[in-house]
Amino acid sequence: MFTPAHYLLPLLLVIGTGGAMPSPWAPPPGCYVAEEAGEPTFRCSQAGLSTVPIGIPNDTRKLYLDANRLASVPAGAFQHLAFLEELDLSQNILAHLSGAAFQGLEETLRLLDLSANQLASLPVEAFSRLQIQVNLSANPWRCDCALQEVLRQVRLAPGTATGIVCGPGARPDLVGQEFLPLAGEEELCGPGRAGAPRSTDVALLVVMGGWMVLVGAYLAHYVWQNRDETRRPIKRPPALPVRSEDSSTLSTVL
Ligand SMILES: *[C@@H]1O[C@H](CO)[C@@H](O)[C@H](O)[C@H]1NC(C)=O
Ligand SMILES: *[C@@H]1O[C@H](CO)[C@@H](O)[C@H](O)[C@H]1NC(C)=O
């Protein structure tokens, strides 16, 4: 029934289109597909990778890319993995994550390991709408507002809280300190973002202004009294308007 041409034609097509057609895909060296506890798993640990490999099977639920040389995770790097639940990126040299690095994983991702990398900061957007547990241990954290906001969005993997320590890029008084106790007692996101710090500033100005007016008024009153004493014969002028004039000149002097 089938002549050799029936077999050759698809093969030639695959070669001719450079693999764009569904062709037998081989994992990169050091990577393999497995089934672990019934879950489709893709393991690429210690595979010498410097980029996220292409062609990861789209039914993968657990993905291990640990102990490689990944320096960054580009936007949408895993968005074709519609079932991905666990992602291990630990022990790489990640210094930068795209704000859209985990885009498309909002519904499925549960566990993310970013430990033992070179991360000093994280884009808050990368974690919006994710319901995950993360391991952020062993990174040189700058211990800034962004990290504080990330920690409001994610949960830490059990037992990893003490592993978040401020690195050399942090404020000098924070270097070497555990981040969580600090973040609990200090608002690192600065004034102006939340509105509350701004209103305390205004309140402080109002209070200080009030004190200035009071002191000015008191001084004016004091000066008036002395003047009254030195010029007793002269009839005392109407009190209020003059007083307020004097208090304003005095407070500008002050
Ligand atoms: C996964 O990839 C296969 C081919 O490799 C394709 O037929 C299937 O539609 C893809 N599934 C999803 C959910 O993208
Ligand atoms: C978190 O990361 C650290 C450092 O890589 C590791 O020792 C620890 O086992 C991890 N913990 C969990 C719960 O993944």
Image (cartoon, rainbow, N blue to C red):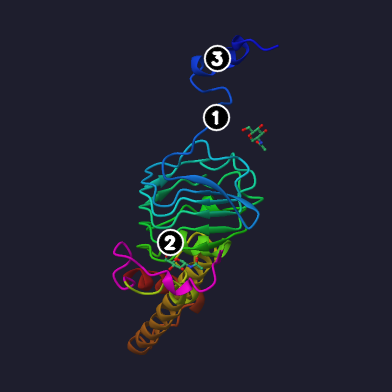
The span from disc 1 to disc 2 (Cα, nearest Å) is: 34 Å
Q: Does the magenta stretch include residue 153?
A: no
Q: What stretch is highlighted in magenta?
A: 155-175
**In the rendered image, which quarter contains the C terminus?**
bottom left
Label 1 beta carbon within 8 A of ligand 1? no
Give the mark nearer the N terminus: 3 vs 1.
3
> Quick check: 128 above or below 16?
below
Residue at the front extreme, as displayed: 1
Mark 3 residue's CB less than 8 Å from ligand 1? no
Residue found at x 57% / y 22%: 21
**C-alpha gap between disc 3 and disc 1:** 13 Å
Q: Position of residue 231 (x, y in %)?
A: 35, 85
**3 or 2: tag closer to the N-terminus:** 3
Residue for badge 1: 24
Instruction: List the residue tagged with mark 2.
Output: 115
- Mark 2 is surrounded, within 10 Å at the Cα level, by few (under 14), some (14 to 19) or many (20 or more) other residues, namely many
Helix, strand, or loop for circle 3?
A: helix
Q: What element carries label 2?
A: loop
Q: Which mark is residue 13?
A: 3
Q: Nearer the viewer, mark 1 or mark 2?
A: 1
Where is residue 118 drawn, in percent x and y? 35, 56
Q: Which of marks 1 and 2 is nearer the N terminus?
A: 1
Q: Does the residue labelled 2 lie within 8 Å of ligand 2?
A: yes
Is disc 1 surrounded by few (<14), some (14 to 19) or many (20+) residues within 10 Å? few
Whether the residues at callouts 1 and 2 have beta carbons within 8 Å, the answer is no
Instruction: Look at the numbered disc 1 and give the secondary structure of its residue.
Output: loop
Pick whichever, 176 or 53, lies toward us.
53
Q: Can residue 91 be seen in this view?
A: yes
**Amino acid type indicated by mark 3:** Leu
Few, some or many residues within 10 Å of mark 3 (<14, 14–19, 20+): few
